[in-house]
Image: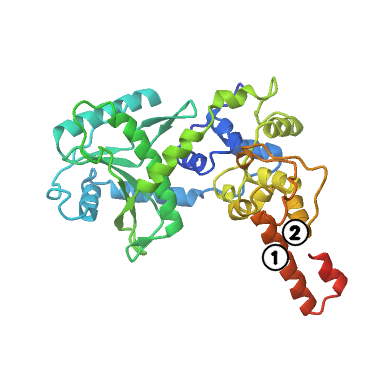
Amino acid sequence: MRGPDVPPRPLDARALAALAANPGCRRRALLDGAGVDKAALARALGTPAAFGQSQFAIARGNAFEARVKADGGTELVRLLHAALPAGQAPEPPDAVDAPDLSAAGPEGRTARTALALREATAAGRWALLDHPMLALTVAGTPAYLEPDAVVVHPDGTWTVVEIKSFAMIDGAADAAKAGAAARQAAVYALALETVAERLPGPAPEDGRVRHEALLVCPKDFSNLPAAALLDLRKQRATTRRQLGRLTRVEEIAAALPPGASFAPDRPAAELTAAVEAVDAAYAPDCLAACELAFHCRDRARAEGDVRHLGRNVRSGLGGLTTVEAALAAARGDHPSDAAELPSDASDRPSHAAEPPDGPEDPAVAALRRAAALRAEALAAAGFPKEEADACR
């Protein structure tokens, strides 16, 4: 599907977190599962993505991470020890084990990481795994993930470490950026759970993978590291549930037209037909997480799908899934050509307008009340009565 000469684009924790945030988008599940380069596909469709991390930011992040790990991980583990609540860890480490994780290919690195985790857990000492490789099966497709680091505690528990280049001012990081880091760390924690399940012997009472991740950022406006713990319990539960809802990739692909391809060298009309053959679930949040968001937004606007107005608007309108249907409900119209929605209409777009059920429907009643209030306000402001009545 991605083209014979196009290498697969691997899934990473950022992509899995975005999938978990929007599990109803079959389009992204298919393209990510097939390893399609969505940025190249968006350019071929004429709607290139206008976001991404700059090379300067990437270089700055790599330099900061190298500084944090320069002493073999001892300072990083000391930051973790200082962030832990009192009584949860022994004395700060004088030395930290740093096992070699090099191996051939992602499968080899995954196996080497699992072996290193087993050995470090059995040793009962502090250990730092620098860029381990973890595997997680999503929608029937294996994804290989590479966290910044994983720390093994002397008690046999594991902590995910996320190293970011955004600043931590007065001990607190930007809430939105810290939330994104927590969602990525939750994906790594789920992948670690699959390794922990295969370890021999009893696991700690609260599980081998800790519920907190360590976020390491530059302190204030310096290049010195500062650390804070991120509670992952909510993110782990949500991500596990949402990833479990994803339809298997082969089931989505089976519904494609014969010969459908997303190779970026195909004609734009052919690519558009292939993309539109897979249902999408666009929301404004996609603009910050998906390269195809601008294409999906244009289509949602053209079709009058209310989801392009935001999830809150979509949920508040209930069964009214198009702008036309919402306006008809506000006016009190009953379109005769409307079709009823399927039972799972909330998970995929619908091109049919559902007829308003009448004032007893809470969404319809709210729309009619809002239209009446707006008409009264326009009339009070001196607008002609005809124009005010037209707003009802």
Tell me the element at label 1.
Answer: helix
Q: Nearer the viewer, residue 36 or 193?
A: 193
Residue 215, how many percent across, how many down?
A: 33, 51
Report the Cα–Cα distance between label 1 and label 2.
8 Å
Q: Looking at the rendering, which quadrant does residue 279 occupy?
A: top right
Q: Which residue was labeled with disc 1?
A: 370
- In contact (CB < 8 Å): disc 1 and disc 2: yes
Q: Is residue 101 visible?
A: no
Tell me the element at label 2.
Answer: helix
Q: Residues within 10 Å of mark 2 (few under 14, many from 20)?
A: many
Q: The residue under label 1 is which amino acid type?
A: Ala
The residue under the point 77% across, 70% down is 375
Residue 125, how many percent across, how many down?
A: 15, 38
Q: Is residue 391 visible?
A: yes
Q: Looking at the rendering, which quadrant does residue 236 occupy?
A: top left
Quarter in which the C terminus is drawn: bottom right
In the picture shown, does residue 93 fall above or below 139?
Answer: below
Q: Which mark is residue 50?
A: none
Q: Which residue was labeled with disc 2?
A: 330
The residue under the point 39% across, 42% down is 237
In the picture shown, does residue 211 fall above or below 373?
Answer: above
Q: Nearer the viewer, residue 351 or 282?
A: 351
